Amino acid sequence: MGLKILLTGASGLVGGSFAPAANAAGHEIVGTVGRWPQPLPGLARQVALELQDEAAVRALVRDTQPDVIVNAAAISEPAQCDAEPEKAWRLNVALPAWLAQATGETGARLFHLSTEQVFDGTRAPYAVGDARRAINRYAQHKLEAEDRVLAAAPGRAVVLRLPLLMGNSPGGRRSVHERLLMLWADGKPAKLYLDEIRQTCTADSVAAALVELCSRPDLHGALHWAGAEPVSRLDIGRRVRAHFGLNDTQAPIIPVARRDDPAAQATRQADLSLNLAPLVQELITRPETFDEALAKLKRPAWWQAKS
Ligand SMILES: NC(=O)c1ccc[n+]([C@@H]2O[C@H](COP(=O)([O-])OP(=O)(O)OC[C@H]3O[C@@H](n4cnc5c(N)ncnc54)[C@H](OP(=O)(O)O)[C@@H]3O)[C@@H](O)[C@H]2O)c1
């Protein structure tokens, strides 16, 4: 039976993949956007809402009476969290806490999206119960949100930790390959760490896992989803470049070493590979190989218009 799903951040990288996938699975999606101006696919209703406004958020949950809430809204850029720390805290910590509290009134389940960055990168691969240590403000926010969500909605909430994400976002400017293409379109080289390891997957893979989770009320607590294999940032860049048929002149890459960069060591985690147990044994959806993820990457509309 189709569920009523309230999706925050419908215009983001994950939200933009989740709504069409959940809609195709027979669910009805009410999605919030912030500044995104156009209708998005997969939504039964699109609501423009300032998610820093607690009263408005609680009213939307009350009015919608969802079976499931998927919180894909966030300030997901570490640099933006440092530039606007209070706003970032309201989106990354207060909002998930309000949503978790609201599930107590409606009985809804909550899927809150978290990050591999709650770990410090020194002891990969990380299992769900491993000690967390945040080394930047974004990670601190996400760690605090995990605790608040699980405390406020025990048995009803899933905190789904995700890796660095690839994929095709609604505006074409949010995922790893989209950001690389933006740099190259501006004539800039991409400086990529050869010793920074991520188990990236696409937002479509996350969406497939989330859709399956919607029909699994037996699963709750902290869980991990990611790709099938750890890859270095440098390899990600090189393989994205090859996927789009670009050469070194069109898409210059400068390999750099994190171990030679004290500033990077202070705020960027070395290896955030994830152990996907127990979720991977529970789902039919399989983690993507890097090549499977690459095959899904499209040229963003802005890039096609430029070339
Ligand atoms: N991207 C990654 O690599 C990655 C990796 C691990 C975990 N995650 C987590 O996955 C989740 C989804 O990330 P994402 O990459 O899909 O994020 P994203 O592309 O940056 O999208 C963020 C969403 O939040 C909305 N939003 C932000 N501020 C808002 C505000 N003040 N009021 C209303 N809406 C607001 C945006 O709306 P508008 O654009 O319409 O303004 C957008 O829909 C986040 O929890 C993130 O921490 C992401």
Image (cartoon, rainbow, N blue to C red):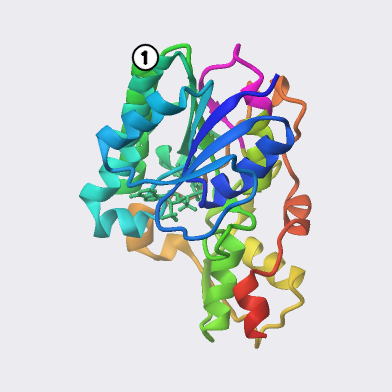
x and y percent of residue 138 in the render? 34, 47
In the rendered image, is residue 143 in sight?
Answer: yes
Q: Which residue is mark 1?
A: 105
Q: Amino acid at mark 1?
A: Glu
Left or right side of 73 for 183? right
Name which residue lies at 50% across and 24% down.
66
Q: Is residue 61 left or right of residue 232?
A: left
Placement of 211 over or under 9, stated as above or below: above
Q: Image height check: is 145 above or below 116?
A: above
Farthest-out residue, left: 86
Magenta stretch: give its range: 212-225
Q: Report if residue 221 lies within the magenta region.
A: yes
Q: Is mark 1 within 8 Å of ligand 1?
A: no
- Dividing the picture into quadrants, the one containing residue 241 is bottom right
**Quadrant the C terminus occupies:** bottom right
Q: Position of residue 140 (x, y in %)?
A: 31, 40
Q: Position of residue 196 (x, y in %)?
A: 52, 55
Q: Image quadrant for the N terminus?
A: top right
> What residue lies at 72% left-to-right and 21% top-to-bottom?
281
Q: Secondary structure at mark 1?
A: helix
In the figure, residue 55 lies in which quadrant? top left
Q: Quadrant of residue 77?
A: bottom left
Q: Residue at x 57, y 82 (%)?
A: 185
Let me know if residue 24 is in the magenta part. Answer: no
Q: Position of residue 221 (x, y in %)?
A: 49, 19
Look at 67% across and 23% down and name the residue there.
2
Q: Is residue 134 visible?
A: no
The foreground one among 90 and 236 is: 90
